[in-house]
Amino acid sequence: MIRIKIIYLMMVLLFFSAVSCLIVPMPPIIPESEQTSREITCRVLRLTSESKILQYVKPEYPGNNGKIKTDVTVYLKADVDQEGRVKDVHLKWFDPPFGEAVTSAVRQWVFEPVLVHGKPVESTHAIEIVFQGKRKEVVAKAWLYPDEFRVCEMRKKNLKIESPPKLLKEVKPIYPESARLQNIEGDIAMEALFSESGEVEAILLWKAIPYLDEAAIEAFSQWIYEPLIVDNTPYKHIVSLCVRFHKGR
């Protein structure tokens, strides 16, 4: 009887020894942000100061596009005089059929004048216009365009640029796996202000989507251009970029 018990105990010990050999400790799960992220040295700006539109003219759906089923978004800038009236319109990201309709409407807008030290000044406004396919409505929002970007754009108008600077280094964004698993898709619209040496100094986010904007900024911040030189003088310049994150593409 004692011999049988000893044999039984030995079999039990052998069984648990074999099972313990099969259990392999799993490596720690490292968050995706820690696997791929790098320190972003440039400044990141967002459109936060909402503009007040005193006179609003609703953009019309062009042609038969009133039958669209999905939303169509148009991004543009409007240069405004001291009285708040639109002087010029610059389309940034848009579907061609909607560009003319948006431009025609925005040229009739009047903004609340921007005051500096109590005096009205000229300004630039960033505008987002969404043609809502299901609701058949048009929704518009506007924000004050940052001064440092505006100054750069205004200076560029007075420069005789023979050819734009060449892109020396391009880093393509990586679709974050965490976003892919959650079916997060969309477009990230942004502008980068490049310094006189051709490196990114600041990035302005026009449209941000959680998980995706960080990946886009991380890639765009590493781009390098040839310096923009006019008459032997280096200048800052702005580059626009729309990054598309869509599964299956």
Image: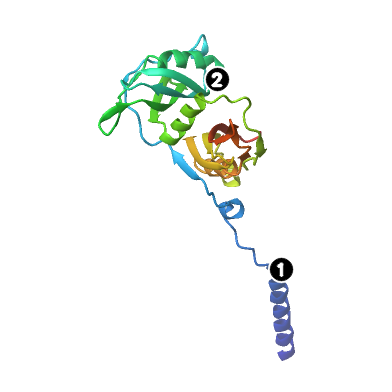
Can residue 182 be seen here? The reply is: no
Q: Quadrant of the N terminus?
A: bottom right
Identify the mark at residue 95; answer none if there is no mark. 2
The crowd level at tag 2 (other Cα within 10 Å; few <14, some 14-19, many 20+) is: few
Given residues 107 and 131, the one toward you in this image is 107
Numbered disc 2: secondary structure:
loop
Q: Position of residue 101 (x, y in %)?
A: 47, 13
Way the structure is coloured: rainbow
Residue 58 vertical position relative to residue 33 in the rendered view, above or below: above
Determine the residue positioned at 46% across, 27% down: 154
Residue 48 vs 139, above or below: the answer is below
Q: Nearer the viewer, residue 46 or 31?
A: 46
Residue at far left of view: 118
Residue 85, x across and y down, in percent: 35, 18
Numbered label attached to residue 22: 1
Name the kind of residue labelled 1 in the image: Leu
Q: Looking at the image, which residue is at 62% across and 36% down?
A: 247
